[in-house]
Image (cartoon, rainbow, N blue to C red):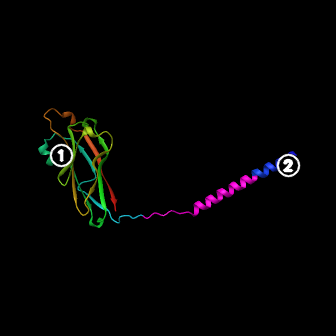
Amino acid sequence: MEFKKLILILTIAISVIVISFMGVSYAWYSLSNSSTSFNTTTANTDITILYAQSEYVSITTGIPISEADVPTKAGISRFTVNPGNNLSGYQVAISIDLTQIVIDPALKTNDFKIQLLENNVPIYNGTGANISGSDLTIKQLSNINVGSTYNYELRIWINETGVSQNELMGKSFSGKIKISSTIKK
């Protein structure tokens, strides 16, 4: 009687194992033969970005300057963004960040100024006090017109306040201008 029970249990166990293997094999076969397709398109063009100097900004602060002298005496980086006419029919948006920022702790003050101009109009005014990490967004993601040229000027300086600012002179600031774009049909 014990032998018959053993044979019955083994037969049931082997049947369960065989059925499991068949189920797993069928599932694997079904998965390997299935496919999913997506219709995607990619814009066949680039946005032109030209840096007058470099995408890297590196300055050692000098003497404080007045607001009137900023256009001629501040540390300035110029660059141009041009979404060409071949992007017509697309919606183009860009954002501009300063990344890989290395700033002397003494410059994390309201007297250390950062300004971004777009076509000679200020679109960002910040200070060293705004910098808390290694990245700083200076232009939020916003649409730009296809076929138009956008001229940018990043200005960095110590603002003259009329009090001693000797502790701010000779300090260093560096970072990289990063331009991100999004194109949507």
From the viewer's perspective, is residue 169 above or below residue 37? Answer: above
Q: Main secondary structure of the magenta part?
A: helix
* Number of marks: 2
Rendering coords of residue 176 (x, y %): 30, 49
Q: Quadrant of residue 30?
A: bottom right
**Quadrant in which the C terminus appears:** bottom left
Q: Is residue 43 magenta?
A: no
In the rendered structure, find residue 74 and report the number of the disc placed on it: 1
Q: Residue at x 79, y 50 (%)?
A: 10
Residue with the mark numbered 2: 4
Toward the viewer: 179 or 162?
179
Rendering coords of residue 63 (x, y %): 16, 39
Q: Residue furthest right?
A: 1
- Label 1 CA crowd tier, 10 Å (few <14, some 14–19, many 20+): many
Q: Residue at x 81, y 50 (%)?
A: 8
Q: Residue at x 26, y 42 (%)?
A: 173
Q: Residue furthest top?
A: 164
In magenta, the rendered stretch is 14-39
* Label 1 residue SS: loop
**Which badge, 1 or 2, comes first in the chain's sequence?**
2
The answer for how far apart the CA atoms under marks 1 and 2 are is: 97 Å
Q: Amino acid at mark 1?
A: Ala
Toward the viewer: 75 or 184?
184
In the rendered structure, find residue 164 and report the number of the disc placed on it: none
User: Which of pointers 1 and 2 indicates the residue nearer the eye?
Assistant: 2
Q: Amino acid at mark 2?
A: Lys
* Label 2 residue SS: helix
Rendering coords of residue 72 (x, y %): 14, 48
